[in-house]
Image (tube, helix red, strand yellow):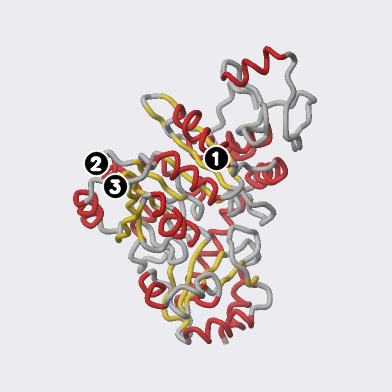
Amino acid sequence: MDKDFLPSGWGSVAVHAGHQQDPKYAHLVPIYASSTFVFDEAEQGMRRFSGKEEGYIYSRWGNPTFTEAENKIAALESFGIMENSSPLQVKGILHASGMAAITTLLLSNLKAGDKILTHYSLYGGTEEIITKVLPPLGITAIITDLRDLNKAEEAIKKDKAIRMLYIETPANPTIQCVDIEALSKLAKQYGLIAAADNTFATPYLQQPFRFGIDFIIHSTTKFLNGHGTAIGGILLGRDVEFMKTKAYTMAKTLGGNANPFDAFLLINGMKTLELRMDRHCHNAMEVAKYLSAHIAIAKVNYTGLPEHPDHSTAMKQMRHPGAMLSFELKSGLQGGIDFMNKLKMCVRTVSLGTCDTLLSHPASMTHYSVPKEEKIKYGITDGLIRMNVGIENIQDIIADLEQALN
């Protein structure tokens, strides 16, 4: 795409953004499967190592295939957003996983004595790093219900050591939503860094930068890749200089870099993101309506339903409520196990974001070892089922659920 052509459609950006013409004129970005890159002469190596010349040195530090993925996601997260009368500029760093991206975010911004303010119902890996990995480094977390702005402000006023506000919305696995704009304003009021995990929503449904967030992370493994073929993550920041210096140094030193093949799969997966998400979302709404009327279901967690407590928040900041939902079976733990065992088309597995419908039973799978009182605090009941609604024909998804519930 010519640099002077500015597409007006999100789908066009998903297809074309980030691409630079390959020197050998390949239509698609090649998989640059090279650990290192050569120099024309010693002086060029000196210039690159000193930062006086841009260019690739070593794939842990950067790779052309990574660059296209980074630039495409940055374009999607900043599409249509203006800052100081100019298009918003953001920088992304591709990682080997979402957890690697979160690690770079936390360690490049926080030091011993700092605290993170966050909420219940986080992705299990995120919760583990902030409750088990960071405390020995002197970084601790304060967890409260951030849907209550008074509680959030009260926590900030009470503890001056809070340095970062970290949110995940919609959250995993209860699908609760927090108000990005209100929390971002609160963070700015008290001089905090504001970071958001946008994995469940994707930039097609929600753009946290639009509401003042400083950093966004994604597990690109999920909807961005869309096909369950590769692990990956990305950290994006609106402070481009910080991303090029401190965040980049932390990322390359920690060694959680992506690999060219997974980056290539991610790039091609993102080209169909708009089409996939439209189908995912349509199906999810139909499934939520079906489940909410079923006699075997005690509760459906889907922000597209008007009765969901976070419905208005989700509708304010999202294009559509999304593809993820969870529901509680009245029959509890054994009912959840029996239901999972009866599925015939939908897939029993963890993870999310693939074209096929995926279901997991947290109480017997991902959160099996978590004490029951902790699970209840996070809204994870014995009968809770998490569902990634796929892009199959909706009548077949519902038919499989029907026979498993009956």
Q: Nearer the viewer, residue 272 or 221?
A: 221
- Mark 2–mark 3 contact, CB under 8 Å? yes
User: Residue 219 in the image: x percent, y percent?
Assistant: 55, 51
Residue located at (63% from left, 72% from top):
348
| Neighbours of disc 3 within 10 Å: few (<14), some (14-19), many (20+) | many
| Neighbours of disc 1 within 10 Å: few (<14), some (14-19), many (20+) | some
Query: In whole angstroms, how far apart are the C-alphas of marks 3 and 1?
Result: 36 Å
Question: In terms of sequence position, does the residue under pointer 1 or pointer 2 come before the other?
Answer: 1
| Neighbours of disc 2 within 10 Å: few (<14), some (14-19), many (20+) | some
| Residue that lies at the very extreme toward the front in this rendered image | 136
- Mark 3–mark 1 contact, CB under 8 Å? no
Amino acid type, callout 2:
Tyr
Residue 162 - label: 3
Residue 10 - label: 1
Left or right of residue 9: residue 301 = left
Question: In terms of sequence position, does the residue under pointer 3 or pointer 1 come before the other?
Answer: 1
User: Residue 39 in the image: x percent, y percent?
Assistant: 73, 19
Q: Nearer the viewer, residue 135 or 371?
A: 135
Q: Nearer the viewer, mark 2 or mark 3?
A: 3
Q: Secondary structure at mark 1?
A: helix
Residue located at (58% from left, 40% from top):
94
